[in-house]
Image (tube, coloured by chain):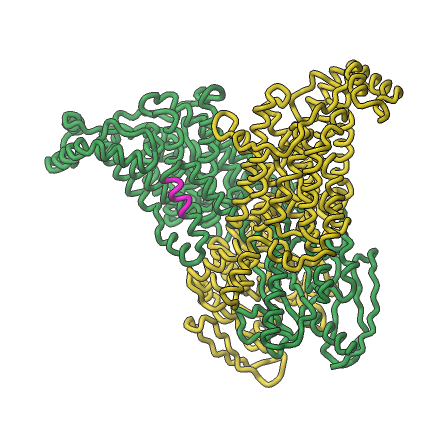
Chain colours: A yellow, B green
Amino acid sequence: MVVNSNRVEHFDNHESMINIQIELPPSPPLEIHRVRLPPERTTFQKLKQRLSEIFFPDDPLYRFKNQTCLQKLLLGLQFLFPIFQWAPEYNFRLLRSDVISGLTIASLAIPQGISYAKLANLPPIVGLYSSFVPPLIYSLLGSSRHIGVGPVSIASLVMGSMLSETVSSSEDSILYLKLAFTATFFAGVFQASLGILRLGFVIDFLSKATLVGFMAGAAVIVALQQLKGLLGIVHFTDKMQIIPVLTSVFKQREECVHNIKMVMANHCDGNLLPGLPVDKRGILHKAHGIAFIGKLPEGINPPSANMLYFDGHYLGVAIKTGIVTGILSLTEGIAVGRTFAAMQNYQVDGNKEMMAIGLMNIAGSCTSCYVTSGSFSRSAVNYNAGAKTTVSNIVMAAAVLVTLLFLMPLFNYTPNVILGAIIITAVIGLIDYQAAYKLWKVDKLDFLACLCSFFGVLFISVALGLAIAVGVSVFKILLHVTRPNTMVLGKLPGTQIYHNLNQYKEATRVPSFLILAVESPIYFANATYLQERILRWIREEEDRIRANDESTLKCIILYMTAVTAIDTSGIDTICELRKMLERRSLQLVLANPVASVVEKLHHSKMLDSFGSRGLYLTVGEAVADISSLWKDQA
Amino acid sequence: MVVNSNRVEHFDNHESMINIQIELPPSPPLEIHRVRLPPERTTFQKLKQRLSEIFFPDDPLYRFKNQTCLQKLLLGLQFLFPIFQWAPEYNFRLLRSDVISGLTIASLAIPQGISYAKLANLPPIVGLYSSFVPPLIYSLLGSSRHIGVGPVSIASLVMGSMLSETVSSSEDSILYLKLAFTATFFAGVFQASLGILRLGFVIDFLSKATLVGFMAGAAVIVALQQLKGLLGIVHFTDKMQIIPVLTSVFKQREECVHNIKMVMANHCDGNLLPGLPVDKRGILHKAHGIAFIGKLPEGINPPSANMLYFDGHYLGVAIKTGIVTGILSLTEGIAVGRTFAAMQNYQVDGNKEMMAIGLMNIAGSCTSCYVTSGSFSRSAVNYNAGAKTTVSNIVMAAAVLVTLLFLMPLFNYTPNVILGAIIITAVIGLIDYQAAYKLWKVDKLDFLACLCSFFGVLFISVALGLAIAVGVSVFKILLHVTRPNTMVLGKLPGTQIYHNLNQYKEATRVPSFLILAVESPIYFANATYLQERILRWIREEEDRIRANDESTLKCIILYMTAVTAIDTSGIDTICELRKMLERRSLQLVLANPVASVVEKLHHSKMLDSFGSRGLYLTVGEAVADISSLWKDQA
């Protein structure tokens, strides 16, 4: 195949492209395309585009384009208060669905509220308060139609464990309550600011793998904490970790056995079953030494803004707890909202959801509520009961209101041991061993992150366990960047397709060429590695050629499609590699560099040194052009 | 173009490949290739390969393959002591070159040693000691032939600044000296362990951009510190940062003016010029209140192992200083070694170099030396003077030995003000503003990392400035992963090449198709973003189609070549995206997924749900096959 390729080359910066034009003979297949620079942009334009991709990837204002002023105003109102989107079309049929689902989630919300408040070591009534105000706020601001708002298990137990490490809820209950409201306030501020600053991607760093391990670890910790109530241990440890708790149980095993016997005896006497008059039951229990909830105050949420705590010794703990519970509840709320939105084919705006959840927590912290979010269990029930809009949250709040005003005495004699049992049943469901097994099967490093967060939570602490898991996840990303894949490509017979020799056994090497694909951006963190790895590939290829007595290696083609970015270290590396290979009479050619890489090579004056036969659009064209040149020279 | 494509499909896991075979009509161009799974490997095999890529990317034992026992022993000795590689072939001609270059670098090493020791606030003689023992150790173990070993400016000044923050070198000089030797010991231990654990890639995280900023910042700080000696200020600040130093100078400006006048007067009297007898010069200077070096002890390095400091209050500072100076000197040493190795076309083994430099610092810490490494200036002189092997280091050490034994009195009356001037001249050269300008032109984020380390060092502290700069570099990597590029591809007319529409203006959209390239691995950190971004591309494409009245969108092709990895979150995202698009009667197709992605899709049972028309080897084949199907259906 001899081709007369009279090349006409010129670099034309004004048109910001590199023209490598070739006058071709009429016959195929040697048609060489030009590698082009992307249109030139100023630094400001680039910065603007970069920032808008970081902060406004969803282009939130696209609805406002090409609209009249009045429409813009209406859209703006709808944007701020999604209630305006569906309110005009609200009708009786929707209302009926919402009432049914609202009452259904209320029936779940009341026992759940009490149990979760106990999880957080808070008075049970706080759990009910938290199912009243926040759902009302959310129904005004939230963009998900199926979320059921209320306390969530994970944030409750994290709040319980983090605050208990500093303040005992039994010994100094007022201070504890103050800290809980303060933490809720900071959680809300943190969540709302993430939304306002459009930093929603922060929660993306909690991967599903991390959360699976975290929830399982937290569930074990909470279940263990319930041993105090279940076994009736008086001198229980203040710590949350598995070792001190088990030690504590083991030390007081005789007391435990005694208490269990007593509960069993009570049970056989039928004392735990309904039937006896309420007052008498309480007296009986007290005589047997079994603790129960006690009198719950009637009436709606008292204001608690005066209990917020902005100075002094414990502020740091409150802020830390607020941030950790805030991020955890946000993760659950956003994930739940997105899940149901995907099922019903509408969009939930992550940053707006953050603002809604944040504002509802700020409001909650002033009305005796603790951290709330979109609860997974409540939302699932809501969705299945046929909820259509957030009106179901309003219905639930109304039902809780009725309970708060009139039905509180019914709960007075619920024994703590039963609450403990409810909590254990609830949290055991958080241990998703099937998901963990799937992680193991699909991605071992994800499984490692999962294990790290599980054991971190179990043996070290909730916050640190989470931090370790996030660290492992980030380390995984960095590892991939530091040690990227490189592989040898071969040609699929009869095509112009070049592919991984290892994956496609029918692909064959092209004599005298070594075609390497680099599967990562070239950064300072991997530039040295890549240089050495490429040199090793060349050494191995030369050894192979010597062993098989094939034609000598003359050209190395770097397939750059997956090199999606390059920095100054990367450019230096390629430049140096090129010089080193030149000294060994080997040619280095780049195939299909992406726009940003071509641009950087151009700015660093590297393109000129590569010249016309250093840069090709495809591997096929590079091979054809260079081997035709060799034939011409021969 | 109507094609009868009778598909024969079967999924065959035993052969670990997905066969999507198509019986083709004789006429081109519709030939569909199968997407294959890579050969199946066990978890252990994968782990082994992954670990060997992380820790042994250079395949250090390749030399030992297919060798006899005796040869292996010899190669092993050569591996541990590179001196065995060149010693058998050493001859008089090489020795002559090495002697000349060794004497040349000795003439540089002596004033440099004295100045750099002053930089580290150490007695000048320590600088000379450090040019004697470490070069001897390195010449046994090091694999670079051109490195000139000795103290380096950057590590010297960092040691000076970090130790001075805790202990004053003038008030408690013995403790300061102890801490310096201890820090050197820990620097050596840290360096050697990086090499032994094959964690050499840690130093890759100090990018060139970071180092440019860091060196410039450190140079300014050191130059400012010399103001004390130059201006003869007695009550100088202990701090290293720019603000306290300038404040200190400003407060004592009258004293400064007086001192400068005096030095000028001395100069005009000719007192700084040689000519007067040595003794008389000293007396004269003293009378004028100008400080000079003073008497330097004669004799070789005294042992200092007894001065190492392993317990007590300052151990933490010593370890921290050791690690920071260790990593900085290592970076310089390795970079210098690699540079000259590349120029002479031989390989330097990073991990072995770390061990050599580490061991030489451990030995140095026991013989009154402080941190040494391969010095850039010394190595450049060595190389240009014609050095051939590390024997030039032995010659230099011998020359320093002679100086230590016999020539010390010559240095007694060197005025401190002159040392200060030498240091300022040396460090000003470290401010590489041209490199900074190039960073600005090529990569704005690299420039930002550079600025951060510059101002961090200048205003905060050396260690923190470095940490901030590394943080910025890592953040840059994470940012790229969190917000990866996505772009629309079009077809280059008359080819099967699909490329970025933005970069190649002649490329055209294919009607009814939207071809998107994702330019990053799909991870937990970007899965949500990518899903939303892809939905936005689809929305924008549909808007565009409506505006131009084109044929409706029916199929989205994700071009996956640059998706070099995927984790469980990524798989869930693709699965969810597919379902969402299905509900909108849009087909989602993957083109050219890489081996690891196909493998993970397979393990997570996703491949089955994609079926035969969900996965193609190239975009061209996907477009051809799917549009032929549409035509069949029409």
Give the quarter of the image for residue A164: top right
User: What is the span of residues highlighted in magenta in the rendered image?
Assistant: B451-458
Furthest-right residue in this view: A268
The residue sitting at 42% across, 23% down in the picture is B303
Magenta segment's dominant SS is helix
The residue sitting at 34% across, 43% down in the picture is B104
Q: Is residue A418 left or right of residue B296?
A: right
Furthest-bottom residue in this view: A26
Give the quarter of the image for residue B85: top right
Location of the N terminus of chain A by quadrant is: bottom right
B324 above or below B24? above
B244 above or below A517? above
Q: Is residue A314 left or right of residue A403?
A: left
Front residue of A97/B158: it is A97
Q: Position of residue B319 (x, y in %)?
A: 48, 29
A123 above or below B423? above
Residue B530 seen in this snapshot: yes
Q: Does the segment drawn in magenta span residue A346?
A: no
Front residue of A477/A76: it is A76
